[in-house]
Amino acid sequence: MITSIENAEHYTWGAQCHSWHLLKSDSLSVIQERMPPGTNEQLHYHERSQQVFYILSGTATFEVEGEMKTVEANQSIHIPPNTKHYILNNSDADLHFLVISEPKAHGDRVNI
């Protein structure tokens, strides 16, 4: 099956952030996301899921265990299970990225 943001299951979160499920299974999740400038998610961790964030366009800022990290387009960052983190878009342009979670992260999130 060919999937894109045109036909994938869609949801919004935060302040006008958009997500599309490109692959949604219990063992693996691939989500494409768009974050407008000045948006962020809440600090959290996942008890079982590891995640890879791959930046498609824009610049992402992550807080990972209290340390700030900048991830540019065509770069990725790995977040192991039980690692406190959040992503924010400090830039003046939309941030587009993939979140790949193994196993799925929905239902595995603990907000701090």
Image: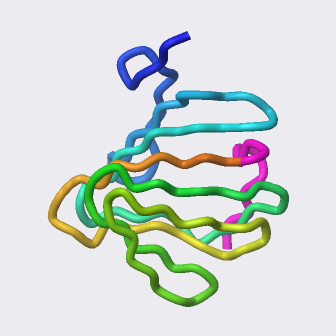
Instruction: Name the image quarter holding residue 52.
Output: bottom right
Where residue 38 sits, quadrant-wise, is bottom left
Viewer-nearest residue: 43 or 34: 34
Q: In x, y percent, where is residue 47?
A: 83, 62
Residue with the most extreme bottom position: 67
Q: Residue at x 80, y 33 (%)?
A: 26
In this rendering, would 39 be left or right of 93?
Answer: right
Taking the spot 42% from the left edge, 44% from the top edge, the residue there is 33
The residue lying toward the viewer, choosing from 93 and 41, is 93
Residue 24 on image: x %, y %? 66, 28
Residue lying farthest to the right in this orientation: 48
Query: Is residue 64 left or right of 90 when viewed as pictured?
Result: right
The main secondary structure of the magenta stretch is loop
Residue drawn at (73%, 58%), measured in percent from left and top?
50
Which quadrant does the N terminus fall into?
A: top right
Give the vertical position of 7 relative to 80 (above or below): above
| The C terminus lies in quadrant | bottom right
Residue ranking furthest to the front: 74
Number of disc labels: 0
Q: Nearer the viewer, residue 108 or 6?
A: 6
Place residue 75 in its image quadrant: bottom left
- Residues shaded magenta: 102-112
